[in-house]
Amino acid sequence: MQELIVTPEAQGEPMPGAAFEPAIVAFVCNWCTYTAADLAGTSRMVQSPNVRLVRMMCTGMVDPKYIIKALLGGADAVLISGCHPGDCHYINGNYKARRRVKLLMEILPRFGIDSRRIKLTWVGASEGNEFAATVNSFAAEIKELGPIDTRRLPLL
Amino acid sequence: MGSIARIEVKDANPVAALQGFCARLLADGEISAVLAPRRLPGNGGTMPALVADPAELRDVDPLAPSFRLNAARMLTRLTRGTDEGGLVAALLRPCEVRAFIELCKLNQGSLENTLLVSMDCPGAFTNVDSARFSGNRGDLDALLGFLRADGRGAFDGVEVARACRTCEHATGAEADLTIGLFGQDVENGLLLMANTPRGEGFITRLGLPEASDDGSRGSALEALLAERRATQEKLFAETTAATSDMTKLSTFLSACVNCYNCRAACPVCYCKECVFLTDVFEHRPWQYLSWARQRGALKMPTDTVFFHLTRLAHMSTACVGCGQCSNACPNDVPVMELFKTIAASTQKAFEYEAGRDPGEAPPLSVFREREFPELTGGLD
Ligand code: SF4
Ligand code: SF4
Ligand code: FES
């Protein structure tokens, strides 16, 4: 097997002092968390600007590869948020999502991706404040954790 | 404990004895054909063949240490849908049986339409190495020596594939019938053991002499499995250390050219159309350029690590550790090592074992209402 040298600069050191703004990709269910996000916005709640929402019809359609692609593409963290158990519009999509997140938690941390970079939450349509709080604390946690390595890896 | 019969071996030739066993199967009114490894011309080793005429059994060689492909997918082609042409008796290695069971769970094949016959698997050489052994065709002594090693066979100083050396499912207990080789005097007789009601039925009907288990098979197996588990632990530890962060994983996979041969060879990569072969990955030029600008440089082809991680997520819970991925790789990427290591964790996480039980649903196809509360901060 041929050995490729990864340059030391690419080791993804956290930049001390420099203001690191994490990029968080959030796969949110149209029927609950997306509506909650909308509500948080229209209610002018203070929300971290680090989150990019991807609206899904259900968390049950978040294939593991979307999460993997986001993290390899340089997203510092991924949030998957859907309806509370029992409330999924497609009956059990959120339970399936939970198994997929469990699966990724077995795989990605073994390759050095911190499990704190993947988060699953249930946020109902009326819980705008809950959504804002989730996003703010998640962004703060990831800020603490620093940027993901994959941002600067030349190989992949 | 199921019934045990004896397959007599004459002239110290267990291959001929198994050809005779296949002939008996073919003679049974319920069996319409036998799928079994058959010698290829030249040094090619063996390849599965669907044999309908007993005269064509002459080159059948289920014991040859050749494993060019995992025949589970072939058997799905012969069994899918409703039974139309009678039973196909399939002589498979244990990892082929387990892969077939995984595919049946996805309705790609049917256990109803086959009689699964497996064996105490002596292992096989990689496709690259097997030519040496098959170049020796006709030399029964080499084969007997290989079989007597009870799963530790070597030839010309070359060992069987690493997938085989780290396999702990060597007996095909998931099949209807298992041919017992371990601890046996293979020049005189082999065992035939029933594992299922269908297997029991056939053992009675085939009219083979009854046999009893004197314990030699059990002790040979136990010793082998202890060694295999230790080798497996070593493989897991090595692979884990070599892939413990993204830089290392990237390096581990650096020789990969995205040919996807590993995916094509994998018996349990079950998708009819793989997303990596669709135009999802035919990015526009501006897209590549923008990625290159973002990172300064972009390795091409892109998405190599993405491909492997996605495959791990999609099918590691079904991985049977057969090693065909590594066998198929033109660039010696240690694919089996990675998949076997990760599969051990993902299967454990769902208390699942690929191919163990046809009644066990694939873990990503089911759920419990209350489980894994740690994922959602205790909220479920
Ligand atoms: S990933 Fe490799 S070892 Fe696992 S089932 Fe597929 S081909 Fe066999
Ligand atoms: S067979 Fe080897 S080179 Fe081809 S995609 Fe798989 S790992 Fe990469
Ligand atoms: S509809 Fe919201 S998670 Fe399924």
Image: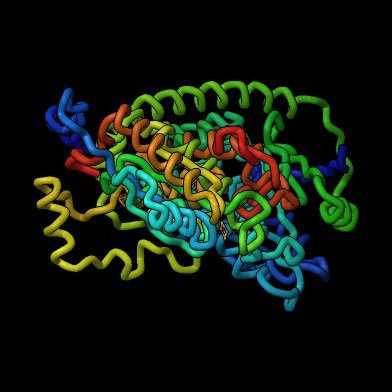
Do we see residue B45 in this rendering?
Answer: no
Q: Is residue B337 above or below residue B367?
A: above
Picture quadrant of residue B289: bottom left
Residue shown at 14% from the left, 46% from the top: B295
Residue shown at 23% from the left, 66% from the top: B283
| Front residue of this view, candidates B299 and B108 | B299
Left-right relation of A111 to B97: left
Left-right relation of B145 to B306: right
Residue B141 horizontal/vertical position (percent): 54, 37
Question: Which color scheme does this rendered protein use?
Answer: rainbow
Q: Quadrant of the C terminus of chain B?
A: top right
Q: Quadrant of the N terminus of chain B?
A: top right
Q: Is residue A138 above or below residue B219?
A: below
Residue A135 horizontal/vertical position (percent): 40, 42
Picture quadrant of residue B6: top right
- Most extreme residue toward the front is A43
Residue A87 horizontal/vertical position (percent): 64, 56
| Front residue of this view, candidates A148 and B91 | A148
Do we see residue B334 in this rendering?
Answer: yes
| Front residue of this view, candidates A136 and B291 | A136
Q: Is residue A95 above or below residue A58?
A: above
Residue shown at 35% from the left, 28% from the top: B244
Residue shown at 17% from the left, 27% from the top: A15
| Front residue of this view, candidates B332 and B87 | B332
